[in-house]
Amino acid sequence: MQTTEVTPNSGNVVEELAAVIRQHLDKYPRLSLNGLSKRCKVSEPTLRRIVKGQIKTTPTLTTVVDILSSINREPSIRRLSEMYPGAIGEVLKEGFSIIQDQNYDYQYVNDLNEHLADQQAYLIFKLAANRCGVTRQKIRELFGLVGEEKLNNLMMNDIIYQVDSTLHTKVKGFSLGHELFINHFKAVANFIDTAQQNGPKKNLYYNFSNSVNEAGLKELIQVQRQAFKKVAKILNDEKYAGNIPAFAIGAVDTLDNPTPPA
């Protein structure tokens, strides 16, 4: 069966987003655009350009979710996409298609972007977010006293809590701003064991590249997306629940960005 990805019209997305912002400001006349900017952590100039229709391309997925989750006080990505059936809904469904198809209730909590910008803090949170949680002793083994201080900070901010000797997060399924992805990707990639292993191999790592046409690139993205839908299904299936803190990371892109990341 052939599937066709819907690419929403950027103008429609901006128009719908502008209407949402205007309606919210009309509902709360004492709230200024600057006040909304501080609340949703999207710059005031960006909000102003959206409201005036001066953005020609679709705003980033993070910007869309920042605005909608703040206005609706709704962290659930699935519920946000259900609230907006038009072009906005299509953007959310396409951007989060891997977790949308199985109705996983992943949440976007804006404040987590700030608290988890640090690589160690992110890894500590990621371990605690596993269904089995993590112990303080394990955090100390992996990250030392500095890591334990970062753990204490996350607990002080009510992001991680402790039950008996196990640490857990308030939010289990979570999504963060796209601007953090590369930093977090590198942090997780450092755990890939490339040393010689005795017995059956317990990990997998590959790095492919070649020049392709537009159809080839589209196919690569589709293959990766389908693979990660299966990965998400396994990780969320109670049949596979255990104590191994497994991870899978991946990306498809091109090596012709105008400014390669440092």
Image (cartoon, rainbow, N blue to C red):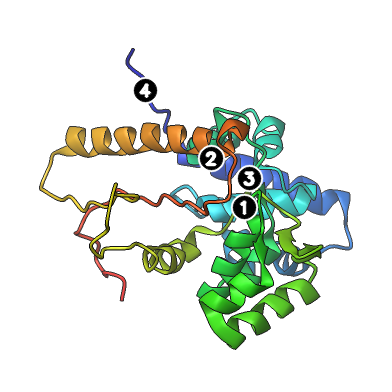
Q: Which residue is mark 3?
A: 17
Which amino acid type is marked by label 3? Leu
Q: Residues within 10 Å of mark 1 (few under 14, many from 20)?
A: many
Is label 2 or label 3 in front? Answer: 2
Q: CA distance from mark 2 to mark 3?
A: 33 Å
The residue at which mark 4 appears reads as 4
> Residue flagged by tag 2: what amino acid is it?
Leu
SS at circle 3: helix
Q: CA distance from mark 3 to mark 1?
A: 34 Å
Q: Earlier in the sequence, mark 3 or mark 1?
A: 3
Q: Which residue is mark 2?
A: 235
> Which quadrant of the view contains residue 110?
bottom right
* Number of other residues with Cα within 10 Å of mark 3, as a class: few under 14, some 14 to 19, many 20 or more: many
- Report the residue at 67% width, 66% height from top: 135
Who is closer to the viewer here, 257 or 19? Answer: 257
Q: Name the side, left or right, on which 171 lies relative to 55.
A: right
Residue at x-position 54% and y-position 34% = 93
Q: Which residue is mark 1?
A: 130
Residue at the image point whose x is 29% and y is 49% from the top: 201
Q: Quadrant of residue 83?
A: top right
Q: Earlier in the sequence, mark 2 or mark 4?
A: 4
Mark 3 in CB contact with mark 1 (< 8 angstroms):
no
Q: Residue at x 11, y 48 (%)?
A: 210
| Residue 136 percent location from the top left of the image | 68, 72
Mark 3 and mark 4: Cα distance apart in space: 25 Å
Mark 4 or 1: the one toward you: 1
Say which mark, if any, is on residue 20. Answer: none
